[in-house]
Amino acid sequence: MKQEITIIDIARKAGVSTATVSRVLNGTGKVRENTRRKVEAAVRELDYQPNIVAKNLSTARSNVIGVLVSDVRNPFYANIFVECEMYANEKGFSLLLYNFLDSESLERRCYDMLLAQRVCAIVHIGGSVDRMDNNAEFVKKIEEVSRRVPVVTSAQVNGTQSRCVQVNNERCMRKLMEYLLGLGHKRIALAGGRENVRSTWEKRKCYQEMLKRQGIEYGNYYIAESGAYNEQGGYLAMREILKKDPLPTAVIAVSDLVAVGVVHAIKEKGLEIGKDISVASFDNTYIAEIMEPELTSVGNDYCLLGRRIIDMVLGMMDGKECQDWDELPVLIEERESCK
């Protein structure tokens, strides 16, 4: 019989104290990054399985659903979490939020921390699940966890037992492009994001297809990546677009948050939103309503999205055969930023 590995064995292997091992495994207290890596390497090498996880598997499920979010400061993620939480509460469940702040190492550790909290299921929104090239280590982690508890993600993770409820980005972009083309725009720019992020790649693909269908072909001339999905990223991307000649007559930002920076850069150039350059965006969060001028934005029914996510979780917990879902209706709010 294989000898049970304990945190004492981990501590000896990593050359640290058992208290340090405990802090790493539970995600509590401050631990230096190089020390954390030593402990994590020892955990993997010794194939350590926390007793609390084994206990969770042999007892009745809890009523707590763990939620991993890329960055809850982003109103898109915040909206989804709030709607999930309200609906889960109606069903007698509570949510435990872990915000991994776009850190891949913290993202993976969050799975272990949630299992240690004996959650009955995990919802993962953003981060590595939205990458075009899921690395093998991440896929392995999802597969291991999805064998223990149901895992619902915001994008497909092939090779795992997880299921996804996702926004159809191509459908959203098609709606937005049809709107701008209908206003007579021909030079339309796309600002923000990274091509290796699935949601951005899908938007870009549809954007280029829609232009080509209209006989408008300027390749990537009016596309500028931002790297960061925030105001600064949008500002830097728009600065690059403003160097183009001729200037675009309309700009699509990959999110409302990115649009804040886009608008800042346009105004800084002395141009008027809606008159010189129209601006549209994705997500339709509160940001679109408080901007000056108010921002045209395409989004989804967050209430329905939250309900679909939780219904998927509950269905998987009950052993039902659940399928991936992306049938959210697309909603566009026309505001003053587009003419």
Image: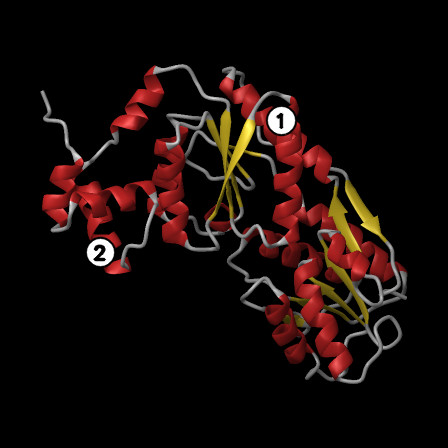
Residue at 44% x, 18% y is 61
Residue at 62% x, 26% y is 89
Q: Amino acid at mark 2?
A: Thr
Label total for image = 2
Report the residue marked by disc 2: 35
Describe the element under mark 2 as helix, strand or loop.
helix
Report the residue marked by disc 1: 89
In the picture provided, is 13 more to the left or to the right than 130?
Answer: left
- In percent of width and height, residue 287 lies at 74, 58
Quadrant that contains the N terminus: top left
Whether residue 222 is situated above or below residue 152 in the rendered picture = below
Residue at 52% x, 21% y is 316
Circles 2, 1 touching at the beta carbon (< 8 Å): no
- In percent of width and height, residue 58 lies at 33, 16
Q: Closest to the observer: 171 or 328?
A: 328
Whether residue 57 is situated above or below residue 274 in the rendered picture = above
Residue at 54% x, 52% y is 71
Which disc is residue 171 wearing? none
Q: Is residue 326 visible?
A: no
| Circle 1 Cα neighbour tier, 10 Å, few/some/many (<14 / 14–19 / ≥20) | few
Q: Is residue 180 visible?
A: yes
Q: Closest to the observer: 175 or 283?
A: 283
Res. 83 image quadrant:
top right
Q: Closest to the observer: 44 or 15?
A: 15
In the picture provided, is 114 more to the left or to the right than 187?
Answer: left
- In percent of width and height, residue 114 lies at 41, 35
Q: Amino acid at mark 1?
A: Asn
Res. 215 image quadrant:
bottom right
Describe the element under mark 1 as helix, strand or loop.
helix
In the picture provided, is 298 more to the left or to the right than 37?
Answer: right
